[in-house]
Amino acid sequence: MRSLRPVVAALLLAGIAGPAVPADGPADSARAVVAAELELAPDLHLLRIGAGAYVVRHRCPFVCNSVLVEMPDGTFVFGGTPGFPEAAQLVLDWIVREHGRRPVVAIDTGYHFDNLGGNAAFRAAGFPVYGSDLTVRLLAERGERMRALTLGFIADPDSPYRAAHAALQFVPPDHVFPIEQGLSLRFGGEEVRVIYPGPTQAPDKVAIYFPGRRLLYGSCLLLAGDRPGNLAEADLACWPEGVRGLMTLPVAAAVAAHGTRLDPGLLQNTLDVLVRHQAGAAPTALR
Ligand SMILES: [Zn+2]
């Protein structure tokens, strides 16, 4: 693998099992390890967190994580997408370069750009993109309003990301499932589960769970930092309940859309951040 370099020596020295290798011990004994980091562009990195499992970290300009997992049948599954199709294309190019032509499946985790902004690249390549019926509807109804809001988060008027976001073509998923039902896909015997935990950070946010790896991609409904982020559409009453539902899953590695933590403690951290926010927020700010 070209320009693969070891990172996070301390984590490696800890000698703990990666999440993509099914572990025998209890879930909380296994912790996520970044085994290697591959740079596809200055703002786009693949972090290998287990056999065939990667965090796709796109700084666009804020950290936006999606996940990429190689299934036993050779299919590459994207959980979420990079923020823009150009970045998604770089990952597709990497797959071809390193592994040859492979089937690719993308799963959108919501209608915000950091959940489906790469769709145009997948659709142009003929790859299926799964997403919920609510995501399709909200993208049509609220896409432009959310674009304006997101542009407001990019303070630098000369930022190339601002221009990219202004020009981003909203492409909906073409394989649509009822959000309340969620989705289960299988590739060579390995399951990928799409879970709707109810309204959380946005009405249509879904989590993607790889049970064979105990890997949970929580997208924007998991909080990796100490602040809640974009709450424009958050349901602060239902969000904690949704997270508590996910806490019943065995999880060795958890990935949030924003931030660098990859451990299962992200779930409790999300609850803690929301409690602190609720305690400090005026009622009018809640929704
Ligand atoms: Zn987000």
Image (tube, rainbow, N blue to C red):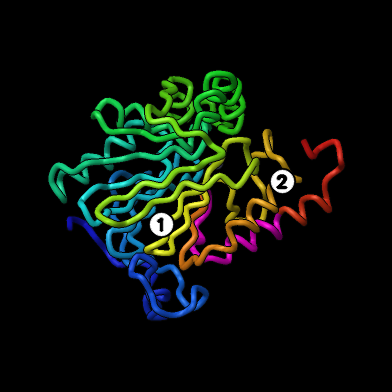
Given residues 210 and 268, the one toward you in this image is: 210
Reply above or below: 281 against 272: above
Reply above or below: 1 against 91: below
Residue 276 x %, y %: 77, 56
Give the amino acid type for the residue marked by disc 1 in the picture. Answer: Phe
Given residues 52 and 241, the one toward you in this image is: 241
Image position of 115 (left or right of 97) = right
Dividing the image into 4 quarters, which one contains the N terminus? bottom left
Number of numbered labels in the structure image: 2
Q: Indicate if the residue with disc 2 has its beta carbon within 8 Å of ligand 1.
A: no
Residue drawn at x 47%, y 37% is 115
Give the amino acid type for the residue marked by disc 2 in the picture. Answer: Cys
Residue drawn at x 46%, y 68% is 252
Residue corresponding to mark 1? 210
Image position of 275 (left or right of 95) = right
Name which quarter of the figure residue 85 lies in.
Answer: top left
State the extent of the magenta-drawn residues as a range.
257-273
Residue drawn at x 30%, y 30% is 121
Image position of 282 (left or right of 38) = right
Which mark, by number, is residue 143? Answer: none
Residue furthest out toward the front = 181
Residue 245 x %, y %: 62, 56
Name which quarter of the figure residue 33 lies in.
Answer: bottom left
Residue corresponding to mark 2? 238
Which secondary structure lies at badge 2? Answer: loop
Image position of 145 (left or right of 286) = left
